[in-house]
Amino acid sequence: MTIIKMSDLKLKNKRVLIREDLNVPLKNGSITSDIRIRAAIPTIKAALKAGAKVMIMSHLGRPTEGTFDPQYSLAPIAASLSKLLKMDVPLITHWVNGVDMSNHSVVLLENVRFNNGETDNSPALSEKMAKLCDVFVMDAFATAHRAESSTCGIIQYAPLSCAGPLLINELDILHKIMLKPARPVVAIVGGSKVSTKLTLLDKLAQKVDTLIVGGGIANTFIAAEGHTVGKSLYEPDLIDEAERLTLEAKKRNASIPVPTDVVVSEKFSEDAESSIRLVSQIDDNEKIFDIGPDTTKEFADIIKKAKTILWNGPVGAFEVEQFSEGTRGIAKAIAESKGFSVAGGGDTLAAIEKYGVANKISYISTGGGAFLAFLEGEPLPAITALEEHAKQTEKT
């Protein structure tokens, strides 16, 4: 993979447009997790230190394209950036046809999805974005799997396009754990359905030493062992796939351990009464919402012995306290492990925040869909565009 890096370019007096992923969770207009904003700060500071005039752009949520919607405004992000950079970062509302940078070192451009054509990767919009800058920096790994104007289309039209430090670091880390990991390798994959992560499970079952499954995914594996899962979410039509994955792992002397005990309840709510059951003792009217204490200890012991750990998804409905101990135990085990750990995915980031283990995880990916797409081996449109741009630039 050959792409131009921002660190290799001279940016003094250049208009630099940086695409970051500042799509952070908001509640009543306040940011509830600024992990992605803080992750972008080193790139922005590096461009400013190099003497560039910096424009930052991002999306936030899923507004109706082409329509301004105040609930999706980047105003809270502009305030956060100003605080973290210790300088004023004004929010520019109308920017597609030009940005006056004469009185500013850095500005934030309003939500890219307020522009018609963004998600369709409109050539017309991509060209307008490209005319804003001398150098375009793609630094938003979390959006690299989307072919959109601000992530992909702009790359071919900008005078010079490159990858930012955050993007480069993300790719380096993910290549490391997928191509040359220290063993044993343990992957923890949670989620509601096998079907949504089947490609990932298939890929990991061929690479890791232990594949720990959680959430609704685990329920299908429990059912594949012949146990009744009551009214739990599971996919009976994918039991054969669960059996196949387990068999393929065994052929490699790897394993996909299935929970031996679980936390069940008849309803999912803050006041739900919960019980611990062996997987062979689940009642017909019960639902599985978490792994049990014995399983948590078993999985924690496996994780602590690992030299490489990949974590994508909680193992239970950790938002409710009664169903949070499994994910808490997994998070604690990863934090205590001496292995190299990588965590990614929206729910995973929320669990990391909840249990305060961010500083004890080797690398936290800012990507969600892109993180999964990379692990599944899918091409990422933005990375492909950067590679093509590098080839064309080299020819000229």
Image (cartoon, rainbow, N blue to C red):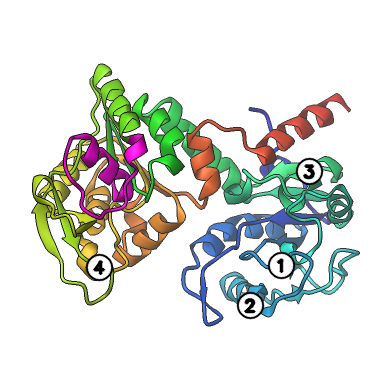
The label nearer to you, 4 versus 3, is 4
Q: Secondary structure at mark 4?
A: loop
Residues at marks 1 and 4 touching, judged by CB atoms closer than 8 Å: no
Please determine whether, in this image, residue 268 is positioned above or below residue 205.
below
Expressed as whole percent of the image width and height from the top left, the position of residue 35 reads 48, 62
Q: Amino acid at mark 2?
A: Gln
Distance from Cα at disc 2 to Cα at disc 1 = 11 Å
Q: Quadrant of residue 242?
A: top left
Q: Residue furthest bottom?
A: 28
What whole-number distance in Å separates the C-alpha atoms at marks 4 and 3? 49 Å
- Quadrant location, the C terminus: top right
| Earlier-in-chain disc, 2 versus 1 | 1
Residue 182 in sight here: no
Q: Is residue 220 magenta?
A: yes
Crowd class of label 4 (few under 14; some 14 to 19; many from 20; radius 10 Å): some
For image coordinates 30% across by 51% down, the residue present is 215
Q: Which badge, 2 or 4, comes first in the chain's sequence?
A: 2
Q: Whole-Å distance between the Cαs marked 1 and 4? A: 35 Å
Question: What is the C-alpha distance between the residues marked 2 and 3?
Answer: 29 Å
Residue at figure coordinates x 75%, y 64% from the top left: 65
Q: Is residue 267 above or below residue 369?
A: below
x%, y% of residue 93? 79, 74
Quadrant hosting residue 86: bottom right
Q: In the image, residue 348 lies at what x, y percent? A: 39, 55
Distance of label 3 from label 1 (alpha carbons) = 24 Å
Residue annotated with mark 1:
64
Earlier sequence position, callout 2 versus callout 3: 2
Q: Nearer the viewer, residue 296 or 90?
A: 296
Instruction: Name the disc covering residue 155, or none.
Output: 3
From the image, tell me which residue sits under label 4.
267
Q: Nearer the viewer, residue 205 or 179?
A: 205
| Element on which disc 2 rests | helix
